[in-house]
Image (cartoon, rainbow, N blue to C red):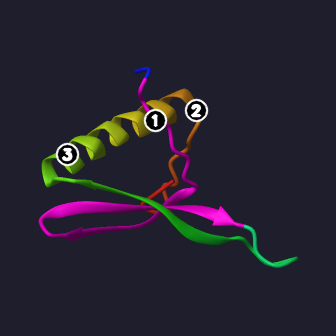
């Protein structure tokens, strides 16, 4: 793990499927002029095969379930999300 790099992203700007690969475009929020909301700027792209995407999705779902169980997140029963 000594050679592991860490990156920060404020979120995912877009996920798309192209060239038989799933592509995640990560963004960071950049300050705007005074009084205006920050704007998302592309910062990095992760590309993985569909099987890798499914594995990542399953891992994220398991983590979401643990966060809900721990009370860190709450399910919004009125919508399909958190």
Q: Residues within 10 Å of mark 3 (few under 14, many from 20)?
A: few
51 part of magenta stretch: no
Q: Please, what secondary structure does the residue beneath circle 2 have? A: loop
- Disc on the earlier residue, 2 or 1: 1
Q: Which of the two marks, 2 or 1, is nearer to us in this view?
A: 1
Range of magenta residues: 3-30
Numbered circle sitting on residue 52: 3
Residue extending furthest right?
34
Among the 4 quarters of the image, the one containing residue 1:
top left
Q: Please, what secondary structure does the residue beneath circle 3 have? A: helix
**Residue 38: x and y, percent?**
71, 70
The Cα atoms of the two marked residues, 2 and 1, are separated by 30 Å
The relative height of residue 26 versus residue 16 in the rendered view (above or below) is: above
Q: Which of the two marks, 3 or 1, is nearer to us in this view?
A: 1
Q: Which of the two marks, 3 or 2, is nearer to us in this view?
A: 3
- Disc on the earlier residue, 3 or 1: 1
Numbered circle sitting on residue 5: 1
Q: Which residue is label 2 attached to?
A: 71
Q: Please, what secondary structure does the residue beneath circle 1 have? A: loop
Q: Residues within 10 Å of mark 2 (few under 14, many from 20)?
A: few
């Amino acid at each position: 793990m000594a050679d592991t790099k860490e990156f920060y992203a404020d979120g995912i700007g877009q996920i798309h499927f192209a060239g038989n690969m799933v592509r995640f475009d990560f963004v960071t929020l950049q300050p705007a002029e005074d009084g205006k909301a920050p704007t998302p700027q592309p910062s990095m792209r992760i590309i993985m095969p569909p099987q890798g995407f499914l594995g990542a999705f399953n891992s994220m779902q398991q983590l979401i379930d643990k966060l809900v169980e721990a009370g860190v997140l709450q399910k919004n029963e009125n919508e399909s999300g958190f």
